[in-house]
Image: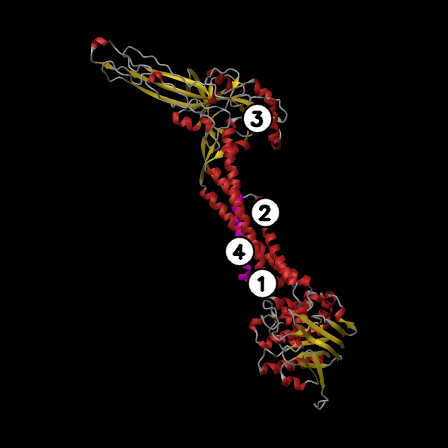
Amino acid sequence: MYELRGVTKRYTRGKPTVHALDGVDLTIGDGDRLVIQGPTGGGKSTLLQMLGGLDKPTEGSVELDGTDLAKLSEAKLTRVRSENIGFVFQSFNLIPTLTAQENVETALVPLGVKTGERRERAAQALESVGLGERLRHLPSEMSGGQQQRVAIARALVKRPKVLLADEPTGNLDESMRDEIMDVLERLWKEHGLTFVMVTHDSSIAKKAPRLVTIRKGRVTVTERDARGALS
Amino acid sequence: MFFTYLRRELRRRRKAALVVASGLALGIALVIVVSSVSSGMEKAQGKVLQSLYGLGTDMTVTKAAEAQSGQNQGPRFEFDARNDDSGGEQSSDRVMVRGFQTLAASTVSKVGAQQGVSDAVGGLSLQVLKVSGEFRQGEFQQEPGQGQYGGGQPGGGGGEPQGRVQGGGADFQVDNYSVYGTDVTKPALGPLTSSKITSGRTFRTSETNAEVVVADTSYAKEKKLAVGDTVTIKGTKFEVIGIATPDSGDAAANLYIPLKQAQTLSDSKDEVTTIYVKASDSQQIDSVKSTIQENIPGTTVTTSADLADTVSGSLSTASDLAANVGKWLSLAVLVAAFLVAGLLTSAAVSRRVREFGTLKALGWTSGRVTRQVVGEAVVNGLVGGALGITLGLAGAYVVTAISPTLEAQVGASGGGAAGPGAGPGGGGPGGMSGGFRRQAATEALKVALTAPVSLSTIALAVGLAVTGGLVAGAFGGWRASRLRPADALRRVE
């Protein structure tokens, strides 16, 4: 469970100071599905970086299960990322020289999983996203949708608590988009994940039970009940 | 994973790896070629010096140069002008001490007694000038009242005829060769050690005053000498017991005879021209040199290093080139190669910012990412090293195969003063007189250049390859360690 209190992130680039985040308070419960939406440069990615322990806030606290990520050392933060957080990126970010299976294995390397087990778990994860036949394919030999599925397998192979996705369908056409959203939704349910997704896509945003809109560093939370009505 | 990733990267980014590796290869190849050529130069120089010095000689002692006294006399030849018509052949040998300067034989034992001297042996270098030929009497045809005239009046330069002389003249040959009087009791030291006996035998230690001679192979060929033949020097018949072939370059003398015989021939009893010295410790040569110079006044000590300084000609030029230009050139290329490898590796890391950022986001530590980058760079360096060694060996092989001939001129090694500079000649044959320059003033030798590659050169190349890889890795690793995991979220490549 996430507890964000007064999270502020300022970037000083030259003279003007940019408030990427400006006193954000947000609570995300275990197993929640949250969509973050907003204009470009509004702070979506910065918020995702805070949640993923990729960057630290200038002020405020980012607690994950009672641990303030803002106060952790780089080494401990790396440990948190390797154990608890899975990432899916807009441009897949697969290692171009490694096969699908090896790409998935990279997520298990920092956990010290032995080679044999690593291979097996990577193969299973790829099977669960429907790529059981493509273990030895290079990213360049696969379609965008398949590459993103490899990336999803990589994010989930270590069984994290949290899955963070940064515009996972941004680089895909519509049919692929639905395919990826189906996979993500299914895995979210199967694994009982906390799932936070940044998206531009309003059709996806509409379906989200909880929508965070971020504009000029400030957030507005919109909740929907089971019938889809706003509250 | 480390090796899988490394292997995949190197295989799939072969071109980039090859660029880095070739840069290093070029630098390393140059280092190998330059260092092997310069060791070839050293070897060539060593050969030149050896042929003058003999094996195992660390320095020579000669008489210090004195002010020209004017007493130095060139050889004089006197021939009889005969009145009869026989025209018989006459010949005259002049045996001169090379450089006209000698040391007392007792100096040899004095030098031998100096601290740091392992052994000393004296030798007498002689130059023999043999003039032989005949006079033909001219026929006097006019003004019979003037009486007869002997052909070739001494010093006359053909003189002004008082009458007309027809058909008179002289036919003379000048034979000039060098003789070295060697101390047969110490065969391990001196100039003869740089020659191998290729026929017959060398001196026995008992032949201190025997009338035997060892001939240099090229002189023997010229004079058609073989073992068992005799050579006459100033009336003394010497038996040829052996033919010596120099290991390289020219021989120190045309003929080698026992020292005592040489002293007798040149009327220089108990005198030597050069003392060959072997130091007990080759590292102490300079101190031994100063000890000798201090304790035995009037001597000049020349070490092989001093002699090396006097080596000139194309060998010296090439040697300087290899030592200076070659060294700096290969250093510059090496530094450039290291820098280029570093920058290329660093640039490769920059191109892979998102890749490394992603790995960091997945929980890879900076150390693990850096190790990966350094690992790739070191392998690149090793590939470059292997390429460079191959290239360098090929280069050295080509140099050895071509083995360009270098000419070396060695300056005067002793303190000998040159005689008066007139060449042989003058007027009529009867009055021929003149000195000649000391032959050793410059010796021109031809040496083939080789480029031997030593194991230490290879070791150096491997070391450089690893260093190059590490330098490149340091650049790349430094860049990689500074990447933020948030770079994984960058949208533009």
The residue at the far front in this view is: A15
Using the numbered discs, state the Cα–Cα distance from disc 4 to disc 1 in whole angstroms.
Answer: 16 Å
The N terminus of chain A lies in quadrant: bottom right
Circle 1 residues within 10 Å: few <14, some 14–19, many ≥20: some
Q: Amino acid at mark 3?
A: Val
Would you identify the image quadrant in which residue B116 lies?
A: top right
Residue B239: percent from left, percent from top = 44, 19
N-terminal of the two: label 3 or label 4?
4
| Viewer-nearest of discs 1 and 3 | 1
Q: Amino acid at mark 4?
A: Ser
Mark 2 — on which chain does it sit? Answer: B
Q: Answer yes or no: are tags 1 and 3 on the same subunit.
A: yes
Q: How is the image coloured?
A: secondary structure
| Viewer-nearest of discs 4 and 1 | 1
* Res. B348 mark: 1
N-terminal of the two: label 2 or label 4?
4
Q: Main secondary structure of the magenta part?
A: helix
Q: Is residue B98 left or right of residue B467?
A: left
Residue annotated with mark 3: B277
N-terminal of the two: label 1 or label 2?
1
Q: Is residue B19 magenta?
A: yes
* Res. B460 mark: 2
Q: Answer yes or no: are tags 4 and 1 on the same subunit.
A: yes
